[in-house]
């Protein structure tokens, strides 16, 4: 599978590192609006080609999969560009600015029978299946509640602070806590409560979200761009509890009894950096002729986008051009 990376920013480096060690993936080309930047990136990671425009890159017949690594605000137009030229797409989270854009992109991909999937890496990691298997096995009994947090000191980073880049903590960080809750409790949400602190530019710097499910389960989620959090996820059941060390890239899963004694620890498999699992899923899906990855179905991408749309509406948070 010839991999092309659209955008040569920081996250593109992480994907390039993962691709170097992933079987069946060739580092083929990279594109940037700045040819010199693309050439520097290509030389650093060993890509065969560098392009000074995205349009040039998608016209290359040898490109199989394009990883879109640009800001949220540009995902919609860049995915449409790739699809128009018959390229499969792995797009960094958040998939688009809103659900309307997501539906349009996925409809076009389905019409052309192209694989398009969201690169929310926690959905593809082995740790996701480990957590689900432990819950199914009854390791903590019936799970009734969970909490999850994610925070970094990144409020001054352009992709966070600028509304034009679809900034804010929600699309950058909250998307992970929402996905964490979905992986544990599913989609049957009957009530959502939330609160957010908006910047003077109108994007959320931190927020809290409470989800109540039809079966009585509850999720409490918190994200911030103002402070570093412990990134822990805790799932509590009637027999014991489960603690996930770092919901953004699970490092370890621990089980505690009702007296808070640790009764089991499950290490996760060694990895390059975690991005390789997205590439493996895409490689296998393309080989099988699928247009979506089972790890992150199209319907789930749209549902999460709809969740975030509703939250932003409640907070009065609108992006330019919406």
Image: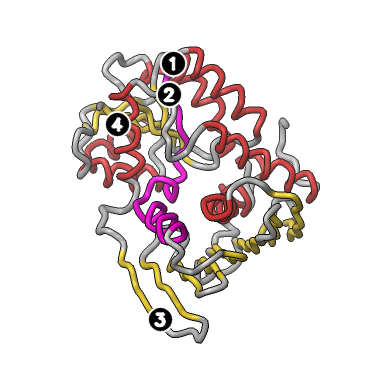
Label at residue 284: 4
Q: Which residue is mark 1?
A: 113
Q: Is residue 139 magenta?
A: no
Q: Secondary structure at mark 1?
A: loop
| Residue 53 can be seen in this image | no
Q: Which residue is mark 2?
A: 291
Q: Earlier in the sequence, mark 2 or mark 3?
A: 3
Q: Secondary structure at mark 3?
A: strand
- Give the residue displayed 58% in from the left and 69% down from the top: 227
Q: Earlier in the sequence, mark 1 or mark 2?
A: 1
- Give the residue displayed 29% in from the left and 31% down from the top: 283
Q: Residue 295 at x, y = what percent?
A: 43, 40
Q: CA distance from mark 3 to mark 1?
A: 48 Å
Mark 4 and mark 1 in contact (Cβ < 8 Å)? no
Determine crowd level at label 4: few under 14, some 14-19, many 20+ residues with C-alpha closer than 10 A. Answer: some
Q: Which residue is mark 3?
A: 262
Q: Which residues are magenta?
A: 113-136
Q: CA distance from mark 4 to mark 2?
A: 11 Å
Determine crowd level at label 2: few under 14, some 14-19, many 20+ residues with C-alpha closer than 10 A. Answer: many
């Amino acid at each position: 599978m010839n991999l092309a990376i659209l955008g040569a920013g920081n996250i593109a480096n992480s994907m390039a590192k993962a691709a170097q060690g992933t079987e069946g993936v060739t580092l083929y080309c990279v594109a940037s609006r700045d040819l010199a930047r693309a050439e520097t990136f290509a030389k650093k990671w060993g890509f065969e080609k560098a392009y000074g425009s995205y349009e040039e890159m998608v016209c290359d017949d040898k490109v199989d999969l394009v990883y879109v690594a640009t800001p949220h605000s540009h995902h919609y137009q860049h995915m449409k560009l790739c699809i128009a030229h018959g390229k499969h797409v792995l797009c960094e989270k958040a998939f688009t600015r809103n659900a309307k854009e997501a539906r349009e992109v996925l409809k076009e991909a389905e019409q052309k029978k192209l694989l398009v999937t969201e690169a929310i890496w926690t959905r593809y990691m082995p740790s996701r299946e480990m957590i689900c298997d432990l819950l199914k096995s009854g390791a903590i009994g019936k799970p009734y509640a969970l909490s999850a947090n994610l925070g970094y000191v990144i409020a001054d980073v352009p992709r966070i602070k600028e509304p034009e880049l679809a900034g804010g903590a929600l699309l950058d960080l909250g998307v992970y806590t929402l996905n964490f809750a979905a992986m544990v409790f599913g989609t049957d949400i009957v009530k959502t409560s939330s609160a957010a602190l908006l910047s003077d530019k109108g994007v959320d710097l931190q927020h809290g979200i409470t989800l109540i499910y039809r079966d009585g389960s509850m999720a409490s989620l918190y994200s911030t761009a103002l402070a570093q959090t412990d990134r822990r996820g805790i799932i509590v059941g009637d027999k014991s509890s489960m603690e996930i060390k770092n919901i953004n890239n699970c490092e370890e899963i621990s089980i505690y009894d009702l007296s808070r004694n640790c009764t089991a620890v499950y290490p996760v498999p060694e990895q390059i950096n975690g991005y390789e699992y997205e590439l493996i899923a895409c490689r296998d899906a393309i080989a099988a002729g699928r247009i979506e990855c089972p790890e992150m179905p199209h319907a789930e991408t749209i549902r999460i986008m709809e969740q975030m749309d509703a939250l932003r509406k409640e907070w009065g948070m609108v992006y330019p051009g919406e």
